[in-house]
Image (tube, coloured by chain):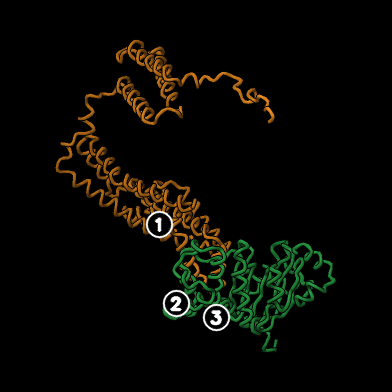
C-alpha cells in the first residue's frame, strides 16, 4: 500500500472570502437589525426640505437595503421560504419609501383611481369597447395567419425573385411601428382619395403588420422539418402541394403554434393603438369616459379589463412553449 | 434503348454543385431484374448519382432513360416517373406524425387514388412481408432503426415501383439490425426487382448483386461482377479501397 502525498495545498483557499462570512446567520441578523435602526433613527422625515444630503441619505438607505436582501437571496444554502420573505420585505420597504417621499397626494388615491361611483351605469360602454377589441383582434388574427401561411408557403418555392419581394414585405412591415402604419392609412391615404373607416384601417394595419411576424414564425416552423422528409415525399411521387399539405405543414404546426399564439396575444394588445384612429375599442371608450367624467378611474378599469383578458392568454402561451420545449428535448 | 429489357440507361451524366464537379460523365445501363451495387470512397458521388436518377438532384447535363423514356425532357411529369422508382434512404425518413400503416398508405391514396381499404390491404400485405404486421399502428419513434427501415421499404414498395433505389440503407443502423434489413432486400432481389444499391455490405453484395459499379471522383472506374471486383481486379484505386473496407 502506497501512501498518497498530501494534496490539500493544491485546493486550499488562497484569498479570504467575504461572502462566506457575510452569509452566516448571526451576521445576517445583525445587518437587518442595523437596517431597521437606520430606518428609525437616520432617515429624514418626509417634510424635511429637500437637499443634497436628503437624497444622499435616502439613496444610501436603498443601497443598504439592496445589500442586505441581495446577501440573503444570493445564498444557495438558505431556504426558499426565507428568501421569499426577504424579497417581499424588500418590495414592502421600496413601496413604503415611495409612499413616504414621492410627495404624491395619497389620501386622494381612491377618489382619483378607484372612484367606481363614476362608472355606475356606464360599464356597458367599456364592455362594448371590449367587444370591439376582441372582434378586431379576431378578424386581424385570421388575416395575419392567412398572410403568414401564404407568404411562408411561397417562400418554400425558393425563387430568388419572389423571395426578394417577400423579404421586402416582411422587413418593411416589421420595421414600421404599428401606430405609424395606422396613422398613415387613416390620415395620409385620404389625400389620395382612399378613405378607409377606422375599423377597416385597424384590421388592415394589424393584418399586414402581424402577418409579417406570422410569416417568420411559419417559415421557421417549415424550416424545422428535416429536408429528408421532403425528399422522401417527393421520391414517392407526391406533388409539391401534397408534400406541403400532408407532410410539411402537419409537422410544422406543433412547432409554430406556441410562438404564433404569442404573436396573436401581442396583436390583441396592439388593438389599443387603434384608439388613435378612433376605432371604438376598449381604450378609446375608456378615454371618452375619462374626458366626460374628468376622472382617470375608467382608464384604471380599462387596464384591469385588459389584464383579465390577457393574463390567462399569456399563461396559455407559456404552457404551450413549455410543452414544446419538453417535446424538443426528448 | 430499344432493348425492352433495359430499365435504366444513363448517358454521359454530369452534375455540378457550384464549382464542384461531382459527377463527371457517368454512362451505364441497368437491365430488368438486375441488382447493381454502387460502391466507392466517400465523396465519390454515389449518392448524388442515385439521386440524379429520380431527379431529387437536377443533373447538369446528360441523358437519363427510365424504361426507354428520356426523363429530362420538358414534357415529363417527374412525379409520375418517381412513382415508378421507390427510394430508401440512409436516415429512413419516415413521416414522424404518421403511424407505420399511415406512412405506407399515404402515397398510394393521394397519388394512385386508391381507396382507404385498398391502400390498407396493400399496406398490411407489405408489412406482413417485412415481418412488421403487428407494428402497423405504431409511430416511427417507437420503432427500432431496423424496423423503421423495413417500414420505409414497405412504404416505397406500396407504390408498386418497377425499380428500387437504396441509398446506404444500413449505414445508420446498429450492427444487430443490419441483418433484418438485408434479408428483406435479398428477398426483393430474388423476386426479380430491379435494384440499385449504394452500400458497402460486402456479404450482401457478393450474394445478391449482379454487378458492381465502382465510382471514384464522379467517374465509373470499374464495372463488373462481384466476383471480378472482389477477387480478380487489378485496378489500383479499387484495390486500395477494398483493402480499407475489409
Q: Quadrant of the N terminus of chain B?
A: bottom right
Label 1 belongs to which residue? A144
* x and y, in percent, of residue A38 in the image: 37, 13
Whether marks 2 and 1 lie on the same chain:
no
In this rendered view, identify the residue nearer to me: A250 or B105. Answer: B105
- Relative to A268, is A121 on the left or the right? left
Residue B39: quarter of image:
bottom right
Q: Chain of mark 1?
A: A
Q: Which chain is green?
A: B
At horizontal 61% and vertical 61% (from top left) the residue drawn is B174
Could you tell me which chain the residue with mark 2 belongs to?
A: B
Q: CA distance from mark 3 to mark 2?
A: 14 Å
In which image quadrant can residue B212 be found? bottom right
Question: SS for tag 2?
Answer: helix
Disc 3 marks which residue?
B160
Q: Position of residue A178 (x, y in %)?
A: 41, 47
Amino acid at each position: 500500500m502506497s501512501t498518497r502525498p498530501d494534496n490539500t495545498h493544491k485546493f486550499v483557499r488562497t484569498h479570504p472570502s467575504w461572502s462566506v462570512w457575510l452569509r452566516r446567520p448571526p451576521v445576517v441578523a445583525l445587518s437587518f437589525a442595523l437596517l431597521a435602526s437606520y430606518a428609525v433613527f437616520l432617515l429624514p422625515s418626509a417634510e424635511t426640505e429637500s437637499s443634497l444630503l436628503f437624497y444622499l441619505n435616502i439613496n444610501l438607505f436603498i443601497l443598504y437595503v439592496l445589500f442586505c436582501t441581495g446577501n440573503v437571496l444570493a445564498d444557495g444554502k438558505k431556504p426558499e421560504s426565507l428568501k421569499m420573505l426577504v424579497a417581499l420585505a424588500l418590495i414592502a420597504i421600496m413601496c413604503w419609501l415611495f409612499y413616504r417621499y414621492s410627495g404624491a397626494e395619497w389620501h386622494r388615491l381612491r377618489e382619483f383611481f378607484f372612484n367606481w361611483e363614476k362608472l355606475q351605469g356606464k360599464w356597458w360602454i367599456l364592455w362594448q369597447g371590449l367587444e370591439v377589441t376582441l372582434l378586431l383582434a379576431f378578424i386581424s388574427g385570421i388575416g395575419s395567419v392567412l398572410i403568414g401561411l401564404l407568404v411562408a408557403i411561397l417562400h418554400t418555392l425558393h425563387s430568388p425573385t419572389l423571395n426578394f419581394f417577400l423579404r421586402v414585405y416582411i422587413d418593411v412591415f416589421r420595421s414600421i411601428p404599428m401606430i405609424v402604419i395606422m396613422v398613415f392609412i387613416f390620415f395620409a391615404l385620404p389625400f389620395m382619395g382612399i378613405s378607409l373607416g377606422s375599423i377597416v384601417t385597424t384590421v388592415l394595419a394589424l393584418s399586414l403588420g402581424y402577418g409579417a411576424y406570422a410569416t417568420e414564425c411559419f417559415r421557421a416552423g417549415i424550416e424545422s422539418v428535416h429536408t429528408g422528409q421532403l425528399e422522401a415525399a417527393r421520391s414517392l411521387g407526391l406533388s409539391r402541394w401534397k408534400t406541403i399539405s400532408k407532410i410539411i405543414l402537419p409537422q410544422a404546426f406543433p412547432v409554430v403554434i406556441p410562438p404564433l399564439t404569442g404573436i396573436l396575444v401581442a396583436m390583441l394588445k396592439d388593438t389599443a393603438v387603434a384608439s388613435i384612429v378612433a376605432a371604438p375599442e376598449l381604450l378609446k371608450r375608456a378615454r371618452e369616459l375619462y374626458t366626460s367624467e374628468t376622472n382617470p378611474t375608467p382608464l384604471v378599469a380599462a387596464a384591469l379589463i385588459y389584464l383579465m383578458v390577457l393574463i390567462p392568454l399569456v399563461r396559455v402561451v407559456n404552457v404551450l412553449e413549455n410543452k414544446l420545449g419538453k417535446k424538443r428535448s426528448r | 434503348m430499344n432493348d425492352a429489357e433495359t430499365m435504366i440507361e444513363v448517358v454521359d451524366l454530369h452534375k455540378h454543385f457550384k464549382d464542384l464537379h461531382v459527377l463527371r460523365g457517368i454512362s451505364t445501363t441497368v437491365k430488368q431484374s438486375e441488382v447493381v451495387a454502387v460502391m466507392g470512397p466517400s465523396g465519390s458521388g454515389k449518392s448524388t448519382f442515385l439521386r440524379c436518377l429520380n431527379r431529387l438532384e437536377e443533373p447538369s447535363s446528360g441523358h437519363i432513360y427510365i424504361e426507354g423514356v428520356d426523363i429530362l425532357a420538358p414534357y415529363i411529369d417527374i412525379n409520375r416517373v418517381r412513382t415508378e422508382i421507390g427510394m430508401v434512404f440512409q436516415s429512413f425518413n419516415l413521416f414522424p406524425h404518421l403511424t407505420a400503416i399511415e406512412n405506407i398508405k399515404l402515397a398510394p391514396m393521394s397519388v394512385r387514388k386508391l381507396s382507404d381499404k385498398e391502400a390498407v390491404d396493400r399496406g398490411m400485405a407489405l408489412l406482413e412481408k417485412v415481418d412488421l404486421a403487428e407494428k402497423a399502428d405504431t409511430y416511427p419513434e417507437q420503432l427500432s432503426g431496423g424496423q423503421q427501415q423495413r417500414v420505409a421499404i414497405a412504404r416505397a414498395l406500396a407504390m408498386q415501383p418497377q425499380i428500387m433505389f437504396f441509398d446506404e440503407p444500413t449505414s445508420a443502423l446498429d450492427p444487430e439490425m443490419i441483418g433484418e434489413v438485408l434479408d428483406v432486400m435479398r428477398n426483393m432481389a430474388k423476386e426479380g426487382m430491379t435494384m440499385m444499391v449504394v452500400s458497402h455490405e460486402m456479404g450482401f453484395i457478393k450474394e445478391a448483386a449482379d454487378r458492381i459499379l465502382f465510382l471514384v471522383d464522379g467517374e465509373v472506374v470499374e464495372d463488373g461482377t462481384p466476383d471480378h471486383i472482389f477477387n480478380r481486379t487489378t485496378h489500383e484505386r479499387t484495390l486500395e479501397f477494398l483493402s480499407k473496407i475489409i
